Amino acid sequence: MAMRWKLCSETNGSLYLIPEAKLQGATYRVGPELEVPGYGCEDHFFELDTVQHSWECVAELLKDETTHGILCDVGLPVIHRGVLYNCRLFMLNSAVLLIRPKLALANDGNYREARYFSSWKQPGILEEFQLPSCILSVATNPSGTCPIGDGVLRLCDAVLAAETCEELFTPRSPHIGLALSGVEIISNGSGSHHQLRKLDQRLDLIKGATAKAGSEAGTDQGGHCKGKLDQRLELIKGATAKAGGVYLYANQRGCDGGRLYYDGCACVAVNGQLVAQGTQFGLADVEVLVVTVDLDEVVSYRSCISSLREQASCTPYPAYVSVPNFRLSSTAPLAASMRRSTHHDQKEGGCSSSSSLLLTATTAKDSSKAKAAAVAAGASVDSALLVAAGASVDSALLVAAGASSSSSSSQMPLVSVVSPPIQPRIHEPEEEIAFGPACWLWDYLRRSGASGFLLPLSGGADSSSTAAIVGAMCQLVVQYISQGNEQVLADARRIGQYGPDEAVDDAQKLAGRIFCTAYMGTVNSSTETRSRSKILASQVGSYHIELQVDMVVEALLTLFQSVTGRRPMFRVDGGSSSENLALQNIQARIRMVVAFLLAQLVPWVRGRSGFLLVLGSANVDECLRGYLTKYDCSSADINPIGGISKQDLRRFLRWGAVNLGYAELANVEAAPPTAELEPIREGQAPQRDEVDMGMTYEELSVFGRLRQIARCGPLSMFRRCLQMWGNMYTAKVIADKVKHFFRYYAINRHKTTVLTPSYHAESYSPDDNRFDHRPFLYNFAWPWQFRQIDDESAAGTHGA
């Protein structure tokens, strides 16, 4: 896995990871989807400059000995016969061997690939591709062309094929036919993003990529929604469970300049068993995994299943490009001789029968440690396939083999014992909330040119969660520095403006340099929230400011009175609902203005350079319901919790109090949510968020999932809620709840058009800009829908 940054080919690491892979002894390297320009280019893919610069980057790889002795698999956009394709490109010894276009495009949720690319629609067909002029001057292709299309590489000792991201998730994935046709090794360069509870599905898919036949990947046996990583792991494990084989999965990791965090987790699965798994969250640029695999186990696995043999016996051999003088391992597996006995049109000489694969995910910074570990484990050089996966905003998977004819004496030895299956490592949702947004924030901060973050810290659950996430980020930074990561240290020194002799070894001190929190109180604020804010800031280590904004609120009310001759009053003092809401909103909006003022000038006040990014802290449920003031503190530069539900945040607060060391989070979680925008009078109940909204956060989360994930309109949502809540409420009460939600959803939908860019963590996010594409003007009375709800609730039925 290696860090990627869109439109920045020089920093995208392909050139630099390949030499590292060769030093590790690698003979095959596969990187993430569209890694050369960066997956997140979006409409920049329409620019010919993007395609041209991608080819120029490939030319850099081909012009010297970078690709000598190692099969390199990179992702880039390619134009063929006037059509733009999302492609894998295979290179070896300064020659382009094959361009393999993507067969199935990701075009839902956060993905819009069909906006830019076309899928390859000619299965099993290879065409001739004319290489561009910048490649002709450096490539060794004799005719100036190479094959393009749906084909595989036939090496001396194995057949290797590629899938690309979405193809793993489709009902009829290519790996099924490839495995039945005898392909032993399938790789997948992916661009898959983090979403809470998603990893396991991905792993199961990879384990069963030759095994998936219609399981419902999105739910578990109890019908509960699985996380995105859960789902991904299911797919990965399933990729080889049904028809055998070795499956290599590479994924980007980090922030690519948008709302998504690509969560890495490079994986290797063999015959349905996971044998290697990389980390999901991290700050390192490259990561290393080492695992040994025996290719003969693939042959044995496939040959013992009768139905598999029968289907494989009538499966045609795929279109292929022969690479007769290159092998991944120093000795050929039994699989190679078995294949040669059937397909003898190519002479593949001199290979004996024993074969192990060493799958290594490499960290460039730690290559010497990985090599030493392999030697200590008693590694031998014979017949190794090393797969190395880089880390950071891209996860490159490097595959290497132990003693090919061009390999050097410095290559990594083979661990002689075949790696056993392992259990998937799945983070708890609370850990995902801590580390995913924390890594996203660090990537954003170090690339934005800012000097740190500013957070309006109210002492409530949402802003306290955001503060804890920034604290977790600082802890991760110090952790990686203590492990010797020079890039993280350099970034921390630059952002924190450390002196040359100052150590970056304390998370609280780092937070004091790059994180400013501000409690902006009014006469309506309580001593409890002020105290919680101050204590939490102290535990995190932020530079904390306390101020009152009453004088600014009073100045605006005086201005309004001078213009209109009237002064609004709160409801508890006899004012109308309009007056009450306006007085609350002016307090909230003033805080936004003050926050941006502080973000611009606090570094100057402290004698530092630069500016601070303002962090928002509105959760996904409040954004959905519209329970926020337009252009208040929900308006910021970025929002790390805008895709996380209130229920998950409360669980995170309890977890963070113990695991992050911020004990005050427990007190924050125990306090009832309140905006503190209305005055408290004797005998009056204090303001409570759930009372103001007319629904609980738990109910709001249910409505959000039904609206987006279950695709429910008002009537179908009423019917679903009647099934879930029928033993708790009458049909009339349930109807009122559903109508109340949709009424305020319609009234407030316009607020989603200006939501602060947020970390995407939930599949029911209301983000109007990239994910949830719906109108922002509705008839809030919903006359047709509400009339049917009323009819069914009165009749005590739930329709046909």
Image (tube, rainbow, N blue to C red):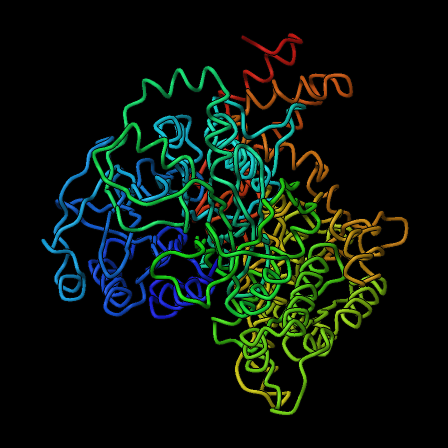
Give the quadrant of residue 404: bottom left
Image vertical order of residue 338 relative to residue 41, above or below: above
The answer to whether residue 391 shows anywhere in this view is no
**In this figure, what is the number of numbered marks?**
0
Left or right: where does residue 41 sit relative to residue 81?
right
Image vertical order of residue 739 relative to residue 605, above or below: above
The answer to whether residue 28 shows anywhere in this view is yes
Residue 195 location in percent, x, y? 56, 45
Give the quadrant of residue 592: bottom right
Residue 277 location in percent, x, y? 58, 48
Left or right: where does residue 732 sit relative to residue 444?
right
Residue 4 location in percent, x, y? 42, 62
Q: Quadrant of the C terminus?
A: top right
Image vertical order of residue 530 relative to residue 175, above or below: below
Q: Residue at x 23, y 68 (%)?
A: 63
Q: Residue at x 59, y 12 (%)?
A: 791
Which residue is outermost to the right? 683
Q: Residue at x 84, y 67 (%)?
A: 531
Q: Nearer the viewer, residue 214 or 160?
A: 160
Q: Nearer the viewer, residue 461 or 714?
A: 461
Q: Nearer the viewer, residue 249 or 83?
A: 249
Residue 390 location in percent, x, y? 49, 59
